[in-house]
Amino acid sequence: MKTVSFVFLIILSSLPANAGFRTKSPIRWGKVSPAEFKLLPPGKDSESSALVLCDFGDIEITNRTFYKRHTRILILNEEGLEYATVEIPYETNNRHDDFYELKARTLVMENGEIVIYNVPSGQIENIRINEKWSKKKFTFPHVKPGAIIEYRYVIASLDFEKLDTWYFQREIPVLWSEVRFQAPDPFMYLVTYANNRPLSGDEEIDFGKKLEWLYNTRQRPRRMELARNSHILFSTGENKYKVWAMNNMKKKIVMKNMPALTTGAGNEPVSAFYPQLRFHLFESSGNLPRNFRPLLFTVRDDYETRGEWSLMRDRSAYIGYVHYRLKTWTQFNEKLLESERFGRFLLRQHGGTRLIDSLTAGKPDGRGKMHAVYDFVRKNFSWNGEYASAAGQDFGDFIRKRSGSSAELNLLLVNMLQHTGMQADPVLIRTANLGIPEKLYPVKDQFNHVIVAVQVAGEQYLLDVTSNSPGYNELNVLDIGTQGWIVSENNPGWLEIFAPGSGKESKEELPRFRL
């Protein structure tokens, strides 16, 4: 069997949007050679259970964001049979994603001939995960060591602000990983390549200055300067971290012969350490075609609660000239404070001053008051097991049900602590199992949880009702080892979250250049 030598290789290419990519794809449906069945990974990966022969993705934005993907995997031994079952999540709320063109098949060598076993469409399950997400699930037939499995699909998504991240590496070796991306007029995207290389404090400041320039420079001189710099907005000077500002362009990135990576560091998911490409919309402006309108509805603040059909019937939602820009952290903070499901949630009052007074009676110091309020919320309201970055129900409904998400419970805790006169603020976090959040600019939906920061006698305490602990300074394990954004009218900003009792509980200001 042929052993492949693993060498890292990055191929970067940029073309004007009207230039067109080379039409030939690295993988073609129905074109499998007998030699592919004989490949083996070398060295430390020689015992791998499976080998990704090719993972090819294409992201194109028109009146939808079209994700096209084709993946081919060689099963090497019995342990590799776990890859014979595939699950592909997609967002179904408000017809957000349309899933189609899904094909899957098994290829085996029998008597020197390639035999194909297709996955029947009737055996592809559509499983609802929750109100927002569903998944396609299927199992390849006749899979055994030495077989090749492959599948391809297209998802048409309404989201064009935060596109899906492309990961080049996996827990099994990858021979070829390629992604192509097209950013047409009038969109400008920040496309970030990161290879297990977090930015230092000084680099974050330098990148922040580049972002400030991007925000403050007029469109024409900005485009001319970017063109002179090959559309690179920021780079560490090595192929470890690079950001392109792409407008009316196409890009292709290929990485070959990637070894398996199965462990990360701390609580972070191993995927955080894979080379990856991230896509964030920076700006969109112009007179857009009418068929682009459903795409633009998703950037409205009321999209989640109203949905596409409600907005389509609203004549005021049809604006000819559209201007969208990535929010600054200041704007992000202000929007949250104005939101009915976040900042306004804090202005409501449960039980009035009489309840607050009864809870804190006989508690002369702030710690005693904090503990009494925390204990009341913990004992009288139950967590439904869902993490959330904002309330999903009205304040009155939540109070009546006495059950809610992590956001609702901890926003209520902030609410009540503030009504005692204490300095308390909500902290948005991305739980540690999802990786460190993007700190340089607000990314849509990157936070999934809310905890509480309280100042008492010059010390900061971090609280989380979902920890289900009688101790008021106990955190959920997924809160620890991540970073959070304090949502505050007077003192917003980032903090590092350490385990209580580690000696690092006080707020640690993170290096940043915050716009």
Image (spheres, rainbow, N blue to C red):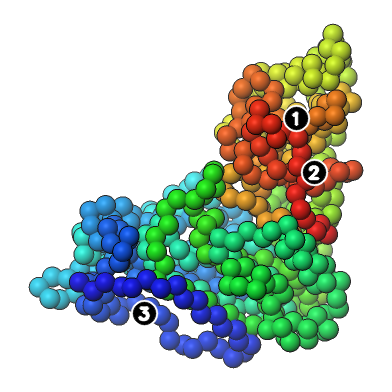
Nearest the eye: 18 or 451: 451
Q: What residue type is labelled 1?
A: Tyr
- Regarding mark 2 in the picture, which secondary structure is present there? loop
* Residue 428 quadrant: top right
- Asked if residue 364 lies left or right of residue 24, the reply is right
* Residue 500 quadrant: top right
- Regarding mark 1 in the picture, which secondary structure is present there? strand
Q: Quadrant of the C terminus?
A: bottom right
- Residue drawn at (77%, 66%), measured in percent from left and top? 206
- Residue drawn at (78%, 75%), measured in percent from left and top? 285
Residue ID for mark 1:
461
Q: Of callouts 1 and 3, which one flags the residue occurring earlier in the amino acid sequence?
A: 3
* Residue 429 quadrant: top right
Nearest the eye: 344 or 149: 149
- Regarding mark 3 in the picture, which secondary structure is present there? loop
Q: How crowded is mark 1: few (under 14 residues within 10 Å), some or many (20 or more)?
A: many
Compared to 186, does 439 lie above or below? above
Residue ID for mark 2:
487
Residue 379 image position (x, y, % from top left): 66, 18
Q: What residue type is labelled 3?
A: Arg
- Residue drawn at (87%, 13%), measured in percent from left and top? 364
Q: Of callouts 1 and 2, which one flags the residue occurring earlier in the amino acid sequence?
A: 1
